[in-house]
Image (cartoon, rainbow, N blue to C red):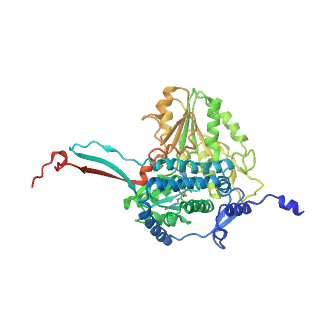
Amino acid sequence: TSSAAAAAPLGVAAQATQLLQSLGVPLDQVQVPGGWPVRSPLTGELLGQVALQAADSVGAVVDQAQRAFLAWREVPAPRRGELVRLLGEELRAAKTLLGQLVTLEVGKSPSEGEGEVQEMIDICDFAVGLSRQLHGLTLATERAQHRMMETWHPLGVCGVISAFNFPVAVWSWNAALALVCGDPVVWKPSEKTPLTALATHAIAQRALARFGDAPEGLLSLLIGERDAGAALVDDPRVPLVSATGSTAMGRAVAPKLAARFARALLELGGNNAAIVAPSADLDLALRGIAFAAMGTAGQRCTTLRRLLVHESIYDTLVPRLVRAYASVGVGDPREPGHLVGPLIDEAAWNAMQQALAAARAEGGTVHGGERVLTAAGPAAWYARPALVEMPAHTGPVLHETFAPILYVLRYQTLDEAIALNNAVGAGLSSSIFTLDLREAERFVSATGSDCGIANVNIGPSGAEIGGAFGGEKETGGGREAGSDSWKAYMRRATNTINYSTELPLAQGVKFDL
Ligand code: NAD
């Protein structure tokens, strides 16, 4: 009957269209005949088709952003903060809808989709406060009747390249800070997630309209493939590129930025470990490990990928984990009971299977990891998370595979566990579960974890915006969001002012004409 038809749930494509319309994205931007296809990992269905911008169109976008810079740098920082306050308001109003669109485009659970938008709101709040605190130091000078100080000035156009797995939050971490610091932003989102980018751009346009007199080109969006990102990296008018993605991407981007002396803010791959010590609260550790390793289907840069368990508790903890892996609900995360959603695409599934085969070849025992076919059929790629008991820290354990695989190893001494924690290329996140104060302090000390994030009694995944986020070594060294990360978006000038009638030179140098 027609009433039954009206009550039938919408398919993901119709839902996405409705959400995009409600968020203010013109449908002709997302229904481009013959355009780049965007699929939902929930079902494999087509959500829309977008026009890709060619690399040679990037110059014109940067041109306009550069003109916007010349005007925006003169706007007082607290007034710039007002724009970010309005952006936060618009994001609050759009939170549910944008969160749902993140779920459709990336396959995150509804609470993680909304959580990502909450993170955008949080960084806006942080940046608004910061807009009145972009302060430099006044420094002691050796010369009488002189003053020495440092001033922070806007830097210029900030290029942002982002990854699929945090399709909207990464832009906001950069944009909220860049805007208050006086920098326009040109954003090249992942080619896997253009719809949430278009929606975010529409939300930002509303904030700009309410603000009133922001220069044209202050926030721009480049929907394109990696060649568009590369054009942004090569443009000499872009003094800072903040690039989030794989270490392979960072290896391509970093030398190009270095060659033209531009700043690189790199947020690259992680291969994060957790140590479970003999004194650990095992109930708490189990929950922390389960979320960190299986949440977001293992597709977070901070996902727990290596678990180092003290030999005295291995046979207690690991069988419990194996049971948790066997029973966790895998499927469409919009349905209750499904904590593990889909992989982003078939390539991610293939990479997962290759890593599991390599682990078996190294003597690993694999629990789980098989494909889960849902009602959505074979075009969606769901996998049961894999727990792999490894005899040694070798092979695929050494590299990030962007899928839910947790390698488990035994250790005997804390020194050995810390050495293993640090024995990979990446240096993003890490944690220890222990109730022993000495072990906890050692882990976060200079001789402990070498990662940008080191936690105690919580897993390595996830972060709050108040802290600086990022990692060392092959993670790229960048820091975003909280603490003093704003300094990356500004240039520092040291000023010496002489209010005497003399001209004393520093270090007592004489130059008497
Ligand atoms: P990816 O490297 O495939 O792509 C990321 C972005 O870089 C995309 O926008 C892509 O178009 C662009 N890109 C790729 N090669 C480029 C090049 N040569 N020049 C310019 N741009 C280029 O990554 P992905 O699959 O989208 O995301 C997953 C990866 O991102 C994982 O390795 C994950 O750990 C990492 N990640 C890191 C963080 C972090 O904060 N450290 C956060 C999220 C994701």
In this view of the protein, which residue sits in the foreground, 303 or 105? 105
- Where in the figure is residue 469, as x and y percent of width and height? 50, 46
- Where in the figure is residue 380, as x and y percent of width and height? 71, 57
In this view of the protein, which residue sits in the foreground, 345 or 245? 245
In this view of the protein, which residue sits in the foreground, 406 or 202? 202
The answer to whether residue 245 is visible is no
Question: Which quarter shows the N terminus?
Answer: bottom right
Q: Which residue is drawn at 51% across and 34% down?
A: 417
In this view of the protein, which residue sits in the foreground, 92 or 44? 92
Q: Which residue is drawn at 60% across and 56% down?
A: 90
- Where in the figure is residue 447, as x and y percent of width and height? 43, 34
70 up-or-down from 393: above or below: below
Q: Residue at x 57, y 44 (%)?
A: 462
Which image quarter: residue 389? top right
Which image quarter: residue 294? top right
The answer to whether residue 271 is visible is yes
Q: Is residue 326 left or right of residue 156?
A: right
Q: Is residue 78 left or right of residue 464?
A: left
- Where in the figure is residue 62, as x and y percent of width and height? 46, 67
Q: In this view, does 499 lie to the left or right of 171?
A: left
24 up-or-down from 399: above or below: below
Question: Which quarter shows the C terminus?
Answer: bottom left
319 up-or-down from 131: above or below: above
Q: In this view, does 184 lie to the left or right of 497?
A: right
